[in-house]
């Protein structure tokens, strides 16, 4: 392969991860199709080394973070370093600004250009955990200065996410949007029988596709449902997602006798797209979201979105939905305002907005951040993807590959 070896590292990945796992998969597929040689290093329960549709995926044993619902982190620096050295990357791309920041410093020493992808705002996450705004901002500025120094570039997916780096005067920030599978998420999937199935005896179907954790504020969706029903709107809610708050939310819904269906993590992407298209409105209450892939998937399926005004989603959703203050009453107001719009135009507007965010444009923008050609060679070879193989018990670095072409040229120079 004549392209660059782009090694990606990510933490906070769980079997029920949604947006991050989707982004990693689609970007890897795009890099591979462009003729590059992507590899992904993630934490997991067991060591594995497999060749997939997104390129090589190396799983290293990771430590479970208590209270996160299964999130793991790559804690063994020496092992990760051995794998990096064995892979010999031309570029690295890191989806974690804190526990993996040392990889940027490693890349600097090895003369490997590096990109850190900002999937969340530091001050936004700290605020959702209850930190005062002034303290959250000060802590975020310290973290972000270190990240901006450690990596060649910082990549943000929205202008909103970029602001916290602009605030500290970082000069190495670039922007690239994420995308959506416009073929899988499509208004043609809308099924009225499926909608009636989830509605039961109610008349308005709401959907929440989110990890059920503190920073996502899923309780706001239940607050909105309760308020709508108090106003006489016969709404029902379907929740697709899992997380540490799941049990408490289910208990609360039962106690309040709210018509909520909890599906847990929906692995079947087609089934999830069917649900998103069947809904009347998608709720996206996370106040620290820097892009919101599940909301974008709903738009692509023709479903308008009500999102948190505190997040980046108003920038993504545009006029195809509404933003609201982070209260159940404000979300209920926005839902009712959307429902007052004629159904066909509001669903057409949602699809039109989603069509602005295809994965091809996203891959092109990410490759530009790497100074990598969009078409490096003939692209990935066709045919079956090799089966996953269990990694040896020894360090996975032992099964590494020769250095990437650009790094090899630097070594020879």
Image (spheres, rainbow, N blue to C red):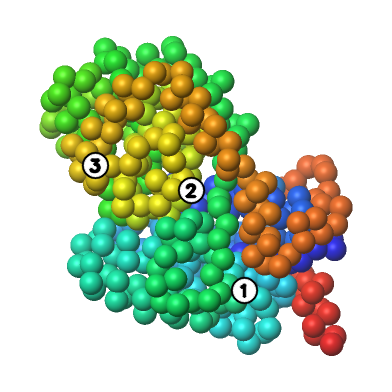
Q: Which mark is residue 114?
A: 1
Using the rendered image of the protein, determine whether residue 123 is visible from the camera's viewpoint.
yes
Which comes before the other along the chain, label 2 or label 1? 2
Residue 11, visible in the rendered structure = no
Q: Earlier in the sequence, mark 2 or mark 3?
A: 2
- Residue drawn 41% across the image and 77% down it: 168
99 relative to 107 in the view: left or right? left
The spot of residue 235 in percent (x, y) is 26, 22
Q: Nearer the viewer, residue 290 or 16?
A: 290
Q: Nearer the viewer, residue 234 or 274?
A: 234
| Crowd tier of the residue under label 3, counting other residues whose Cα lies within 10 Å: few below 14, some 14–19, many 20 or above | many
Quarter location, residue 90:
bottom right
Q: Which mark is residue 275?
A: none
Q: Is disc 3 in contact with disc 1, using a CB cutoff of under 8 Å?
A: no
Residue in view at x 56 percent, y 66 percent: 174
- Left or right: 256 in relation to 98: left
Left or right, residue 164 beside residue 402:
left
Disc 1 on helix, strand or loop? strand
Q: Which residue is mark 3?
A: 220
Q: Is residue 214 above or below residue 261?
A: below
Cα separation between marks 2 and 3: 20 Å
In this image, 193 relative to 178: left or right? left
What residue is drawn where x is 76% and y is 56%? 374
What is the quadrant of residue 143 in the picture? bottom left
Name the residue carrying label 2. 19
Q: CA distance from mark 2 to mark 1?
A: 22 Å
Q: Residue at x 31, y 52 (%)?
A: 310
């Amino acid at each position: 392969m004549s392209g660059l070896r782009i090694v990606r590292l990510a933490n906070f990945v769980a079997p029920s991860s949604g947006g991050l796992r989707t982004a990693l998969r689609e970007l890897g597929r795009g890099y591979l199709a462009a003729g590059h040689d992507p590899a992904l290093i993630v934490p997991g329960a067991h060591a594995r080394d497999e060749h997939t549709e997104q390129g090589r995926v190396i799983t290293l044993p990771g430590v479970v973070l208590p209270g996160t619902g299964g999130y793991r982190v790559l804690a063994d620096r020496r092992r990760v370093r051995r794998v990096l050295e064995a892979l010999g990357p031309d570029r690295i791309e890191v989806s974690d600004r804190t526990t993996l920041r040392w990889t940027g410093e490693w890349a600097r020493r090895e003369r490997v250009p590096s990109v850190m992808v900002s999937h969340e705002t530091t001050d936004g996450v700290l605020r959702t955990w209850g930190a005062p705004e002034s303290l959250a901002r000060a802590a975020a500025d310290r973290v972000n200065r270190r990240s901006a120094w450690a990596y060649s570039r910082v990549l943000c997916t929205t202008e909103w996410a970029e602001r916290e780096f602009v605030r500290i005067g970082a000069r190495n920030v670039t922007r690239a949007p994420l995308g959506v599978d416009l073929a899988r998420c499509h208004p043609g999937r809308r099924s009225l029988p499926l909608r009636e199935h989830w509605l039961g005896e109610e008349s308005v179907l709401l959907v929440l596709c989110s990890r059920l954790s503190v920073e996502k504020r899923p309780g706001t969706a239940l607050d909105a449902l309760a308020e709508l029903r108090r106003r006489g709107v016969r709404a029902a809610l379907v929740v697709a997602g899992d997380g540490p708050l799941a049990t408490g939310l289910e208990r609360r819904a039962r106690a309040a006798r709210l018509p909520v269906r909890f599906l847990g993590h929906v692995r079947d992407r087609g089934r999830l797209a069917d649900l998103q298209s069947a809904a009347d409105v998608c709720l996206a209450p996370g106040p620290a979201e820097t892009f919101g892939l599940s909301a974008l998937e709903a738009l692509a399926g023709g479903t308008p979105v009500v999102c948190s005004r505190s997040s980046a989603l108003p920038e993504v959703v545009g006029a195809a939905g509404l933003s609201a203050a982070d209260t159940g009453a404000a979300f209920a107001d926005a839902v009712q305002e959307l429902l007052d719009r004629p159904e066909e135009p509001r669903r057409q507007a949602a699809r039109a907005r989603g069509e602005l965010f295809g994965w091809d444009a996203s891959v092109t923008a990410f490759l530009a951040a790497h100074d990598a050609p969009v078409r490096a060679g003939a692209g990935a070879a066709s045919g079956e993807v090799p089966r996953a193989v269990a990694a040896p018990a020894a360090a996975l670095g032992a099964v590494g590959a020769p250095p990437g072409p650009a790094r090899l040229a630097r070594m020879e120079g």
